[in-house]
Image: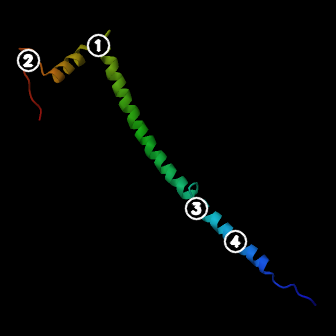
């Protein structure tokens, strides 16, 4: 009855294979494209979408203001308000009430 002895090569191969599986598992969890990075990316994406919505609202507000200041069809109230606030001018019959 001859038994096959455990070969050191076979044991070394198994250890290397188990080590490789553990390394791949760890990279799948915490690696640059792992589950942790994916959840961080999802969180950053949500923050960026919120920021994008804020910027879009600001852009729409500015576009509306530009439309109101179109030289061919300007809103007289807005033009008067901007002139008074930027140039610090007023008509002689106007009363200026400062806001603090």
Foreground of the two, 11 or 90: 11
* Cα distance between the residues tagged 4 and 1: 75 Å
Residue at numbered disc 2: 94
Which label lies toward us, 1 or 3? 3
Element marked by disc 3: helix
Residue at numbered disc 3: 29
Q: Earlier in the sequence, mark 1 or mark 3?
A: 3
Question: On the rendered structure, is 82 left or right of 65?
Answer: left
Residue 18: mark in rendering: 4
Q: Earlier in the sequence, mark 2 or mark 1?
A: 1
Q: Residue at x 52, y 54 (%)?
A: 39
Q: Earlier in the sequence, mark 4 or mark 1?
A: 4
* Cα distance between the residues tagged 2 and 3: 70 Å
Element marked by disc 4: helix
Element marked by disc 1: loop
Which label lies toward us, 3 or 4? 4
Label 4 CA crowd tier, 10 Å (few <14, some 14–19, many 20+): few
Label 1 CA crowd tier, 10 Å (few <14, some 14–19, many 20+): few
Residue 26 placement (x, y as % from top left): 60, 65
Q: Residue at x 46, y 46 (%)?
A: 46
Residue at numbered disc 1: 74
């Amino acid at each position: 009855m001859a038994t096959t002895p455990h070969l050191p090569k076979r044991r070394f191969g198994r250890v290397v294979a188990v080590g490789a599986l553990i390394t791949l598992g760890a990279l799948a969890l915490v690696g640059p494209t792992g589950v942790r990075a994916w959840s961080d990316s999802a969180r950053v994406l949500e923050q960026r979408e919120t920021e994008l919505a804020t910027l879009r609202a600001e852009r729409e507000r500015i576009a509306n203001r530009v439309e109101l200041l179109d030289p061919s069809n300007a809103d007289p109230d807005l033009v008067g308000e901007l002139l008074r606030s930027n140039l610090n001018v007023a008509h002689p019959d106007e009363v200026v009430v400062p806001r603090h």
